[in-house]
Amino acid sequence: MTTTDTFSRVAVTDEAAGLLRELTVQHGPLMFHQSGGCCDGSAPMCYPVGMFLTGPSDVKLGQLEVGLDDPIEVFISEAQFEYWKYTHITIDAVPGRGAGFSVEGPTGKRFIIRSRMLTGDELVHFGLAPRT
């Protein structure tokens, strides 16, 4: 898995990184917005930069380094972040139909998230627990 630093809220598997490199060739620079439900459940939605506009109610979780010139930024709505702030997200790619508006739709693969609770050190780093 690839992360941008020691303490990151997001990571990407090698499988997803490979798919992101392929999709970048087709669509240009990409970004993710972690969906909060509705049509595609909680799927990570991948868009060409500029096709999904983030605003002041979105939180940047981090960025993914996948071997491209520019990292891929990952966002989540502020309201959903309140529920997920203790969670580390890893974006993976598996066989299946992609989410309706996400660029991987026609590839026969789909992005999914794998999550875990933040570790004690991560909680301290992100200001969610006191230093001991």
Image: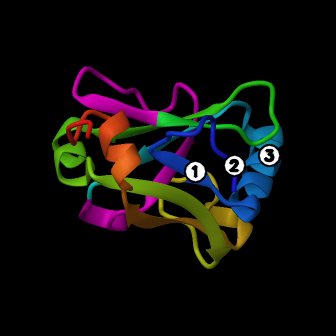
Three-letter code, disc 1? Ala
Which dot marks residue 22? none
Give the amino acid type for the residue marked by disc 3 in the picture: Arg
- Residue at label 1? 11
- Locate residue 69 relative to residue 65 in the image: left or right: right
Disc 2 crowd rating (10 Å Cα; few below 14, some 14-19, many 20+) is: some
- Label 1, label 2: how many angstroms apart (C-alpha)? 6 Å
Which sits in the foreground, 61 or 25? Answer: 61
Residue 120 in the image: above or below residue 92: above
Q: Look at the image and tell me whether residue 35 can be seen.
A: no
Quadrant housing residue 98: bottom right
Question: Image quarter for residue 49?
Answer: top right
- Residue at 64% x, 67% y is 93
Q: Quadrant of the N terminus?
A: bottom right
What residue is pinned by disc 2? 2
Mark 1–mark 3 CB contact (< 8 Å): no
Q: Which of 101 and 132 lies nearest the eye of the viewer? A: 132
* Pointer 1 or 3: first along the chain: 1
Q: Earlier in the sequence, mark 1 or mark 2?
A: 2
Secondary structure found at label 1 = strand
Instruction: Specify start and end residues of the magenta stretch as a single range.
Output: 37-61
Residue 4 located left or right of residue 59: right
Q: CA distance from mark 1 to mark 3?
A: 15 Å
Tag on residue 21?
A: 3
- Check the image and report above or below for 75 versus 86: above
The chosen color scheme is rainbow
Q: Which residue is drawn at the image coordinates 69% and 59% (left, top)? A: 16
Residue 27 picture location, percent across and down: 72, 38
Residue 92, position as x, y percentages in the image:
61, 64
**Callouts 1 and 2 close, C-beta under 8 Å:** yes
